[in-house]
Amino acid sequence: MDATEESLKRGIKVSIPGNRIGDIGTAVQTYGESLGYGVVREFVGHGIGRHLHEEPQVPNYRDPSKGPGPLLRHGMCIAIEPMFNIGGWETLILDDDWTVVTKDGKPHLRILSIPSLSPTKAPKY
């Protein structure tokens, strides 16, 4: 759990106006993979507004094919949700269409924070 908490702190640290969504994913992925964890790709953080799950998606990884992602702006509220597997990054959804397990059957780690962005500095954890 310490690894997901530290990766969350690193994601929050780069969550400042002018940076990009991809900067959050890069911070989370770089830390998680440096410890040997698989960074989950199928589930991501998200924007929060009038509805709980809104755009933009906030991945825990950087996908170079998608570019740097949306610009972070003052007043945005986003959910940063680092998810690491002890093993490979892939997951499976079971037949009940609700339960998620790791593809290799190894444990999963997750933590969540919902920072609101101020105009000049990163949110505090």
Image: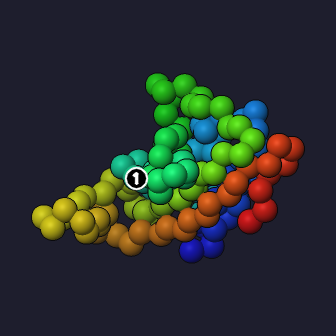
Q: Is residue 85 above or below residue 117?
A: below
- Whole-percent x, y for residue 92 in the image: 25, 58
Q: Which residue is mark 1?
A: 43
Question: Relative to 88, is 25 above or below?
Answer: above
Task: Describe residue 42's horizontal placement relative to residue 92 as left or right.
Answer: right
Circle 1: residue type: Phe
Q: Is residue 36 above or below residue 99?
A: above
Residue 33 shows in the view: no
Q: Quadrant of residue 74?
A: top right
Q: Position of residue 85 (x, y in %)?
A: 43, 63
Residue 73 in the image: x percent, y percent? 71, 37
Residue 91, by quadrant, is bottom left
Q: Residue furthest front?
A: 50
Question: In the structure shown, which secondary structural element does the residue marked by tag 1 occupy?
Answer: loop
Q: Is residue 41 visible?
A: yes
Q: Residues within 10 Å of mark 1 (few under 14, many from 20)?
A: some
Describe residue 98's horizontal placement relative to residue 108 as left or right.
left
